[in-house]
Image (spheres, rainbow, N blue to C red):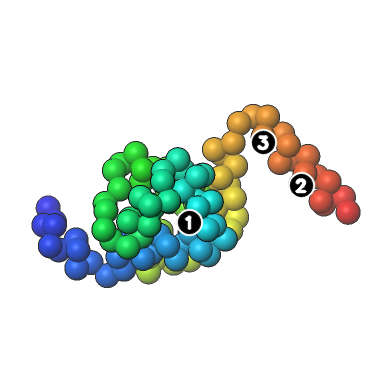
């Protein structure tokens, strides 16, 4: 079992990696905190390594970004697991049936043009 000191010295701090991925996905702090249902201040504290998120918040972060936990905990792993298609698939699976039909219709329309 890891000791807290070992985890703090792990390469790639959680908050830094989270911020990088959030920005890469085009979310402002305000947009993303609203998306996952936490305050902007709390998200800022997580990204600045001042707070550690609960399991519930971690779950919302991963699903809000459409990423797997591996993206954060194994940042040097091959990028093939984190492709845009995989992220879109994960986000799609979180949608309601109504939203899935809308997405399909949008894609059909885009491909017809």
**Residue 102 found in image quarter:** top right
* Element on which disc 1 rests: helix
Q: Earlier in the sequence, mark 1 or mark 2?
A: 1
Q: Mark 3 sits on what residue?
A: 100
In the rendered image, residue 89, in percent from the top left (x then y), is placed at 58, 47
Callout in the foreground (3, 1): 1
Q: Percent from the top left, x then y, of residue 28?
A: 52, 58
The Cα atoms of the two marked residues, 3 and 2, are separated by 11 Å
Left or right of residue 53, residue 79 in this image: right
Image quarter in which the C terminus is found:
bottom right
x 44%, y 66%: residue: 20
Identity of the residue drawn at 40% across and 59% down: 18
Numbered mark located on residue 29 in the image:
1
Which residue is identified by label 2?
Answer: 107
Does any portion of residue 72 appear in the rendered image?
A: no
At horizontal 64% and vertical 29% (from top left) the residue drawn is: 97
């Amino acid at each position: 079992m890891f000791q807290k000191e070992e985890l703090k010295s792990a390469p790639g701090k959680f908050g830094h990696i989270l911020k990088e991925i959030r920005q890469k996905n085009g979310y402002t702090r305000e947009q993303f905190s609203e998306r996952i249902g936490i305050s902007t201040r709390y998200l800022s504290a997580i990204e600045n390594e001042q707070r550690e998120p609960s399991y519930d918040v971690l779950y919302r972060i991963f699903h809000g970004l459409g990423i797997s936990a591996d993206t954060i905990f194994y940042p040097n792993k091959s990028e093939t697991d984190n492709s845009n298609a995989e992220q879109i698939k994960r986000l799609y699976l979180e949608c309601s049936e109504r939203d899935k039909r809308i997405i399909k219709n949008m894609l059909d329309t885009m491909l017809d043009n």
